Image: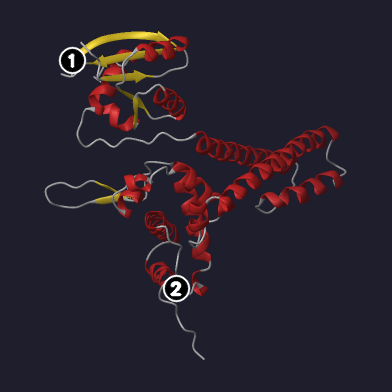
Amino acid sequence: MSITMIGLDTAKAVFQVHALNLGGKAVSTHKLRRDQIVPFFERLEACTVVMEACGAAHHWGRLLSGLGHDVRLIPSEAVRPFVKRGRKNDAADAAAICEAASRPNIKFVPVKSLEQQGILALHSARTLLVKQQTMLANAIRGLAAEFGLVAPLGSHRIEQLLARVEEEKALPESGKLAMRGLYERFLALRESADDLERQVVAHARADGAARRLATIPGIGPITASLIAATVVDIRLFESSRRFAAWLGLVPRQHSTGGKTRLGRITKAGNREIRKLLVLGATAMLRRAPSWNSAVGTWARSALERRPARLVSVALANKMARMVWALLTHNEIYRPQGHVIAAA
C-alpha cells in the first residue's frame, strides 16, 4: 500500500521513520542511518514528510523538497502532548509527529532558505560573542575587586580598570598577568563581534522588510535584521495579537469558571526577538518625556500608574503589533497624534 505521510524524527546519525498509508495506518517503522536518507526518499513516491522544527530540519526540508516531497515542519510543543507517557524514544517521537500533523488546526513552520539561515547564523554568533564578552568583563571585575579595585558599570569601563590595575604597585605581577590575559581576550572578542555586527547592519540596510521595520521607534538594525530573517511569511499570523503571542509577549492565562485570571507573559516563541524588543522598549521609555507621539503619550501615562518594567513589556507588545502591521501592509511607520508644543 502506498505511503502518504512520513513522520521523520531527526538526529545526528540515526533517523526514525514512521510511515502511514491513506487510511492513517502505520505501514512501516524503521531506522535509517544518515547516509541512507537521500537514497530512501529518492526511491519513494512523492508524499508528505513531517519533521519537528529545529535548525537542522530546515536543511533536510530543502533537501527533501528538492526530491519532490511535500515537507512540513511542526513546532516541538505541538508534538509533545502526543508522546505517550513513559515511552519516550525515537519510534514514539516519530509516531507522535504523524499524530500531531494529522490534527486539523495545526500550524506548520515554513522552511527557511539558505540566505535566511546564513543571516541567522550571523546573529547567533554575535550573540554568543557578546555573552562571552560579558563573562570576561565580569571575571576581570571580580579579580580586580579581590585587590580592592572597582569600576562603574559598563563594558567601556574595563579599559579604565585595567589602567588602574597596571598602575597599582602593591598588586602582584601574577594578578596583573591574569587580568591582562583576560582583557586581551576581551578585546579580541569585541573586535570579532563588531565585524559580525557590521555584516548584520549591512543586511538590515539591503533588505526591504528590515528597512521598513527600522522606522519603528525602539527597533534598530540588529532587531530589524533578526525579525526579517526569522519571519518567513507574516501571513501565517492571522492578527497582530497572534504575532505578539508567538513572541511570548501576552499574559499567561489561568482562567476557569468564567473568571479571567492573567499572569506574567508566556515567554514562548523566539527568545532573542523578544529580548531585543524589550530592550528597545526600555530605551524608548527613557525618552518618554520628550517622545512626541500618541505612543509617547501612552507611555508617559502608563509610567504614572505602573512600574517601569511592566510598561516596557507592554510597549514591546505594541512594537510587535507594529511589526506585524508593517510587514502585512508593506508600509513604514508613521507616528500619529503629534503633540504641539506650547508657545
User: Residue 134 at what x, y percent from top left?
Assistant: 63, 42
The residue located at (51%, 60%) in the rendering is 218
Identify the colour scheme used.
secondary structure
Q: Secondary structure at mark 1?
A: loop
Q: Is there a contact, CB below 8 Å, between mark 1 and mark 2?
A: no
Inspect this view and state whether residue 219 appears.
Answer: no
User: Residue 160 at what x, y percent from top left?
Assistant: 77, 51
Q: Secondary structure at mark 2?
A: loop
Which residue is situated farthest in the bottom direction here? 343
Q: Is residue 172 left or right of residue 340?
A: right
User: Residue 259 at what x, y percent from top left?
Assistant: 15, 52
Neighbours of disc 2 within 10 Å: few (<14), some (14-19), many (20+): some
Inspect this view and state whether residue 279 appears.
Answer: yes
Height in image: 228 above or below 316? Answer: above
User: Residue 82 at what x, y percent from top left?
Assistant: 24, 24
The N terminus is located in which quarter? Answer: top left
Residue 270 disc label:
none
Which amino acid does the dot numbered 1 rest on? Lys
The residues bearing labels 1 and 2 have C-alpha atoms spaced at a distance of 59 Å
Occupied quadrant, residue 124: top right
* Residue pointed to by mark 2: 293
Q: Nearer the viewer, residue 230 or 314?
A: 230
Neighbours of disc 1 within 10 Å: few (<14), some (14-19), many (20+): few
Q: Nearer the viewer, residue 142 or 320?
A: 320
Q: Is residue 115 left or right of residue 87?
A: right
Which amino acid does the dot numbered 2 rest on? Ser
Foreground: disc 1 or disc 2 = 1
Height in image: 90 above or below 329? Answer: above
* Residue pointed to by mark 1: 25
